[in-house]
């Protein structure tokens, strides 16, 4: 037995019937485009959430997380899955979503979670928690859902039961990642393709500024995009090209909403161009697009912060770095940089020292690899 199986048995006095892993994700480019009908370009990473689970012979649902061990066991029942205002609302919401999608969960279950994704860092710990829960439910109850449908179920859970109007990207990347590749996803149609990342290293740096999408301005940004969309008379902002936006932007009379729309439409094009660049092995162009993306997120979408700007600016000026940008919804979290492998060590030392001199603390650095999506451990 591996460690999570031993921990499950210690917690619940029986061995688990299913052990699953769901990765976090880092979005390489294409931020705030998914809920606007555009393209995103994330990859699943080798950090994530593990879940061990077993069915019960009653209607109780018990959730324990090693990452929130001081909270103890959160207990729900199949007859009452009302939110409790704690981390366990995420897996409980996934169970509610399975029921809503016509896959009723007919008995209780015990769940044990652990993970190495820093909470609030923008690496989709919540989506990984949801997708790990879905993988466990699928295995325990033999539910015939695809990876794509699991992602939709988990997105539904976060939209409907957690109250965050997120797009599909985080859950889709966690469910459908591919080792060594980034995933270009059309959030409007769910068509997707993979692009190889090549030999460079992805380096994630945690600003240490936690964000909470449920309590941040995320939903405000979404409303501003909807206002711009209505003014432009289009079904989705990302149905317009940058040239078409420039021709019609004066229809958006609110200047803030106009800037939001500009970011989204140009960012959608950057995601498409980035995928093409990777397929051609053009890392210089890919890095340039990353840098442009950060500037747009900072200036037009206004979701960056001082720490993220410092990290991105330092990286962009560093030897061996192709490009760098904030990643995730914003208001804190991480940057992602594409770095020559031979330069990673010097880059890490330099940026930690410089950040420490500016902010009085060293940021956590995670060199990551692109990995496969959610999977069930098989004996």
Image (tube, rainbow, N blue to C red):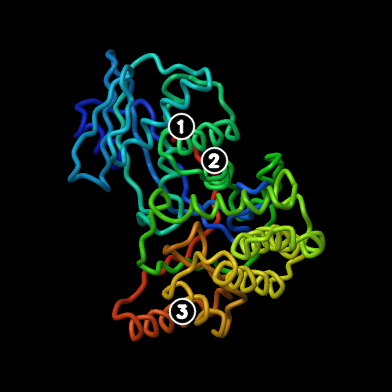
Left or right of 161? Residue 271 is right
Residue behind mark 2: 175
Q: CA distance from mark 3 to mark 2?
A: 32 Å
Q: CA distance from mark 3 to mark 1?
A: 37 Å
Q: Residue 255, image x and y in percent?
A: 63, 65
Q: Residue 249, image x and y in percent?
A: 74, 62
What secondary structure is marked by label 3? helix
Regarding residue 181, the answer to whether it shows in the image is no
Q: Nearer the viewer, residue 180 or 71?
A: 71
Give above or below for 327 relative to 23: below
Q: Nearer the viewer, residue 338 or 360?
A: 360
What secondary structure is marked by label 1? helix
Q: Which is more N-terminal, label 2 or label 1?
A: 1
Give above or below for 207 relative to 142: below
- Residues under numbered marks 1 and 2 in contact, where contact means CB atoms less than 8 Å apart: yes
Which numbered dot is residue 134?
Answer: 1
Q: Which is more N-terminal, label 2 or label 3?
A: 2
Q: Nearer the viewer, residue 371 or 252?
A: 252
State the quadrant of the C terminus: top left
Q: Residue, x 44% and y 77% (percent of image)?
A: 348
Q: Residue 324, image x and y in percent?
A: 56, 72
Q: Nearer the viewer, residue 318 or 310?
A: 310
Give above or below for 361 relative to 144: below
Residue behind mark 3: 310
Q: Which is more N-terminal, label 1 or label 3?
A: 1
């Amino acid at each position: 037995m591996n460690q999570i199986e031993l921990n499950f048995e210690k917690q619940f006095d029986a061995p688990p019937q299913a052990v699953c892993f769901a990765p976090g994700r880092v979005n390489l480019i294409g931020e705030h485009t998914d809920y606007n009908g555009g393209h995103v370009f994330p990859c699943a990473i080798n950090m994530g959430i593990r879940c061990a689970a077993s069915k019960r012979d009653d209607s109780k649902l018990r959730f324990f997380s090693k990452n929130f061990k001081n909270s103890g066991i959160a207990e729900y029942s199949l007859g009452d899955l009302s939110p409790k205002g704690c981390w366990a609302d995420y897996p409980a919401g996934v169970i509610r979503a399975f029921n809503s999608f016509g896959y009723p969960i007919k008995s209780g279950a015990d769940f044990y979670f652990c993970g190495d994704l820093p909470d609030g860092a923008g690496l989709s710990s919540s989506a990984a928690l949801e997708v790990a829960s879905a993988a466990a439910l699928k295995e325990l109850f033999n539910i015939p859902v695809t990876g794509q449908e699991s992602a939709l179920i988990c997105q539904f859970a976060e939209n409907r039961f957690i109250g965050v109007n997120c797009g599909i990207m985080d859950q889709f990347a966690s469910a459908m990642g591919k080792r060594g590749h980034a995933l270009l996803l059309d959030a409007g149609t769910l068509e997707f393709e993979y692009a190889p990342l090549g030999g460079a290293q992805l380096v994630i740096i945690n600003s240490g500024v936690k964000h909470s999408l449920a309590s941040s301005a995320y939903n405000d940004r979404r409303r501003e995009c909807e206002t711009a969309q209505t003014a432009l008379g289009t079904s989705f902002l990302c149905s317009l090209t940058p040239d078409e936006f420039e021709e019609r932007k004066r229809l958006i009379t609110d200047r803030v909403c106009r800037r939001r729309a500009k970011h989204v439409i140009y960012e959608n094009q950057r995601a498409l161009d980035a995928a093409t660049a990777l397929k051609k092995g053009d890392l210089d162009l890919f890095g340039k697009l990353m840098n442009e993306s950060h500037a747009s997120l900072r200036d037009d979408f206004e979701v960056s912060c001082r720490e993220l700007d410092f990290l991105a600016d330092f990286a962009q000026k560093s030897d061996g770095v192709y490009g760098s940008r904030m990643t995730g919804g914003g208001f804190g979290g991480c940057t992602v940089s594409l770095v020559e492998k031979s330069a990673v060590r010097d880059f890490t030392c330099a940026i930690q020292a410089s950040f420490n001199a500016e902010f009085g603390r060293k940021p956590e650095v995670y060199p990551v690899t692109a990995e496969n999506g959610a999977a069930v451990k098989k004996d």
